[in-house]
Amino acid sequence: MGSQWGRDGYYRKARTEGYRSRAAYKLLDIQKRFQVIRDDDNIIDLGCAPGSWLQVLHELTDGQVIGIDLNPVPPIENVTTLTGDFTTPFMHEKVRSLIGEVNIVVCDAAPKFSGNKSYDQARAVGLSEEACDFAVDFLKPGGNFVVKTFQGDMFQLILDKMRLNFFGVKVYRSKAARKGSTEVYIIGKKFKGRRNDSEG
Ligand SMILES: C[S@@+](CC[C@H](N)C(=O)[O-])C[C@H]1O[C@@H](n2cnc3c(N)ncnc32)[C@H](O)[C@@H]1O
């Protein structure tokens, strides 16, 4: 995948290759570069609609895949989807009733943007922090976590939180990101385990 796939190129490529959205290429790009997912991993995908990351995850692993979104997701074979807010204790309990600890959590969630840049960035980073809390609750020690966030004033907060919880932390901007967007992914490898909760 190279620069020949511009904005519309990724859209057309997704249609041709049967992915529900161009976002599929962001996860494929991350996997190619960081080898986050192994072929027997159990995985939770936060903010998964319309489901292109779920399609990619289903291709990458024979393990269990669970997706959560505020919006319903059209069914994908052998993938469980839950409709609701992943930040709520209710959803944590619901997921807990389906699966114990997992190897991987991924999060491509983004709040609805208002157009006010600093407000939107604060909310987006807040959501990334909630996703990190979710990952800390559900990951096995040694597990991996990928989270979308946005660069700006609050960015350091989520970066610090990731460094507290993972041995290896990298920031990556996918080639499939839209031009001019401040979107980046933070890749956390090797979860340190929940003993770090009391440290912050
Ligand atoms: C960019 S889309 C995800 C695209 C997806 N990765 C794919 O490949 O199809 C972001 C999603 O995050 C979801 N979202 C935002 N906040 C959420 C929350 N608190 N709980 C669950 N889903 C959330 C939105 O409903 C939206 O569908």
Image (cartoon, rainbow, N blue to C red):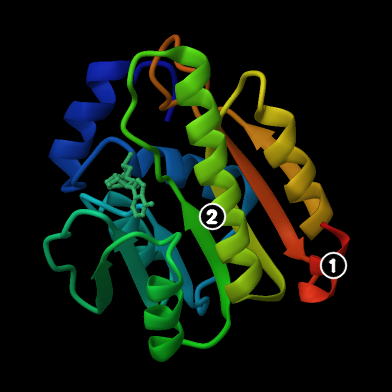
For the image, the number of numbered tags is 2
- Does label 1 point to a residue whose CB lies under 8 Å from ligand 1? no
Residue bearing the label numbered 1: 198
Disc sitting over residue 131 in the figure: 2
Query: Measuring 63% from the left and 41% from the top, which residue is drawn there?
Result: 186
* Closer to the camera in the image, 151 or 84: 84
Left or right: residue 150 compared with residue 4: right
Identify the image quadrant of residue 1: top left
Residue type at tag 1: Ser
From where the camera sits, is residue 64 visible? no
Identify the image quadrant of residue 10: top left
Residue 133 vertical placement versus 79 (above, below): above
Circle nearer the N terminus (1, 2): 2
**Relative image position of residue 67 (x, y in whole percent):** 33, 65
Identify the image quadrant of residue 145: bottom right
From where the camera sits, is residue 80 visible? yes
**Relative image position of residue 169 (x, y in whole percent):** 76, 46
Query: Measuring 66% from the left and 67% from the top, which residue is drawn there?
Result: 136
Left or right: residue 175 compared with residue 38: left
**Relative image position of residue 104 (x, y in whole percent):** 56, 67
Mark 2 neighbour density, 10 Å: few (under 14) some (14–19) many (20 or more): many
